[in-house]
């Protein structure tokens, strides 16, 4: 099928002299497919997708690249357990004229939250914790926490005790009241050096950072509001404490290695540096700009040459489209892939239903144990299915799993900030219009 073969030169978005173009073509033909360890459909029609309609997706994303609205991306679509579409677009590195590879490695930021949430559930299945337990039972620093409450006149804030203990489930659902340090007590968070989601350049274990974080005033009372923040980083520290292993070791041995996720890790192996996709910013059409090489959130990051000490469960992993698709297919299969069972079917079911009840989140959606979950298609107003779950990352990557359609979609790119890009919504529309049975 056309999307699993190297593209002809005429489709390459970056055109140079013929000699350079020839070299790029040879290089692309030598690249192994990101989905090579996943079963592939002989043609999309075999799994109920239209080849002709998928061409609309290909044309649309080639147009994004040609208009310099998108530097590069990889789209992987699985249906009924088989890869039906795998296509790379644009450049892995525009300045070096390096085409995007199907097996390119991406900073997946908050897509790290799903594997860490799975790690917590593994520990529950082993009888080592319950998600209803107070976090302070395992991380004593959280036994008593505080909340910053804005004063009525907006002139400052007061710090009050939390009404109850934060539970592990509060962290899994982002209802613990913990932000990324930008709440009412932002001055204290800034003084403590704990703001933003980026941890790769920190020269200390994540547990040390989290211990200091526990003493800071949080943004809301536990269980009262959906607040996005360091919840999964705290869960990473909890996994380390409960399992007795560093987070990277636990994830590698209990999830990544069993699932064959060979390119998923917190830091990049030196021999894989040439596969790391470059980060760009997009302010509008024709404004793709390479981000600085220095450390920090909006940069190329310290994933290759950093201290390699801080394993951020909330936003620290690197991965490929193929690796992440294997992880998601395991969930769609009810916790098992290729004979390797990671979770029980009942645990996956528990994770992928909404736990937020009446707490405001997004129209038509609730939040489960690590994922957003679709509850009302009309209220959300986008193609999909009830029970669909997914999330995304700060570098503009995204994914979703649609059990009703037996569908897994992974979209990898490296754009921060992304301006007014509408590519993710276009992708969703183009995937669903290609379903034929």
Image (cartoon, helix red, strand yellow):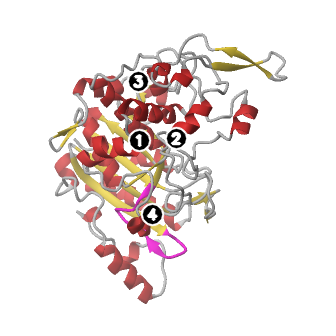
Q: CA distance from mark 3 to mark 1?
A: 32 Å
The one of 268 and 278 positioned closer to us in this rendering: 268
For label 2, the residue is: 206
Residue 437, position as x, y percentages in the image: 22, 41
Q: Is residue 416 left or right of residue 47?
A: right
Numbered tag placed on residue 375 in the rendering: 3
Considering every residue shown, the one lying at the far top of the view is 163
* Residue 146 quadrant: top right
Q: Main secondary structure of the magenta part?
A: loop
- Do callouts 1 and 2 mark residues in contact (Cβ within 8 Å)? yes
Magenta stretch: residue 128 in it?
A: no
Which residue is at a point 33% across and 71% down the rendered structure image? 7
- Do callouts 4 and 2 mark residues in contact (Cβ within 8 Å)? no
Question: Would you say residue 265 is visible in this rendering?
Answer: yes
**Which quadrant of the figure contains the N terminus?**
bottom left
The one of 44 and 413 positioned closer to us in this rendering: 413
Counting residues from the start of the chain, the first of labels 4 and 2 encountered is 2
Magenta stretch: residue 97 in it?
A: yes
Tell us which disc is closer to us: 4 or 1.
Answer: 1
Q: Is residue 168 left or right of residue 53?
A: right
Residue range highlighted in magenta = 93-106
Which element is circle 4 on?
A: loop
Which residue is at a point 16% across and 50% down the rendered structure image? 46
């Amino acid at each position: 099928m056309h999307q699993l073969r190297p593209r002809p030169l005429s489709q390459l978005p970056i055109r140079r002299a013929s000699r350079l173009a020839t070299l790029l073509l040879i290089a692309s033909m030598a690249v192994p497919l990101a989905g090579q360890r996943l079963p592939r459909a002989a043609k999309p029609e075999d799994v109920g997708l239209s080849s002709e309609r998928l061409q609309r997706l290909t044309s649309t994303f080639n147009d994004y690249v040609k208009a310099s609205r998108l530097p590069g991306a990889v789209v992987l679509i699985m249906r009924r357990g088989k890869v039906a579409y795998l296509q790379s677009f644009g450049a892995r590195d525009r300045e070096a004229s390096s085409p995007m590879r199907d097996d390119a490695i991406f900073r997946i930021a908050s897509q790290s939250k799903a594997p860490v949430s799975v790690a917590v559930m593994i520990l529950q299945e082993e009888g080592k914790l319950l998600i209803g337990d107070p976090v302070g039972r395992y991380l004593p620093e959280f036994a008593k926490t505080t909340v910053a409450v804005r004063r009525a006149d907006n002139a400052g804030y007061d710090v009050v005790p939390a009404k109850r203990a934060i539970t592990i489930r509060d962290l899994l659902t982002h209802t613990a009241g913990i932000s990324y340090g930008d709440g009412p007590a932002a001055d204290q968070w800034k003084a403590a050096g704990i703001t933003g989601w980026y941890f790769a350049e920190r020269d200390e274990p994540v547990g040390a950072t989290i211990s200091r974080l526990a003493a800071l005033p949080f943004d809301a009372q536990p269980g009262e509001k959906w607040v996005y923040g360091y919840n999964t980083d705290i869960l990473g520290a909890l996994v380390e404490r409960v399992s007795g292993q560093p987070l990277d070791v636990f994830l590698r041995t209990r999830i990544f290695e069993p699932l064959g996720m060979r390119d998923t890790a917190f830091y990049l192996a030196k021999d894989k540096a040439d596969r790391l996709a470059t980060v760009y910013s997009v302010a509008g059409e024709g404004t793709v700009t390479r981000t600085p090489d220095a450390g920090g959130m909006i940069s190329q990051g310290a994933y290759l040459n950093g201290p390699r000490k801080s394993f951020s469960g909330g936003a620290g992993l690197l991965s490929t489209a193929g690796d992440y698709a294997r992880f998601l297919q395991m969930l769609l299969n009810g916790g098992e892939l290729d004979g390797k069972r990671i979770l029980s079917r009942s645990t996956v079911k528990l994770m992928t239903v909404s736990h937020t009840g009446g707490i405001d989140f997004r129209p038509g959606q609730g939040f489960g144990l690590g994922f957003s979950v679709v509850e009302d298609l009309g209220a959300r107003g986008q193609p999909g299915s009830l029970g669909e779950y997914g999330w995304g990352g700060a570098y503009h990557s995204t994914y979703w799993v649609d059990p009703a359609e037996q569908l897994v979609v992974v979209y990898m790119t490296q754009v921060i900030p992304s301006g007014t890009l509408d590519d993710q919504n276009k992708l969703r529309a183009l995937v669903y219009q290609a379903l034929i049975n």
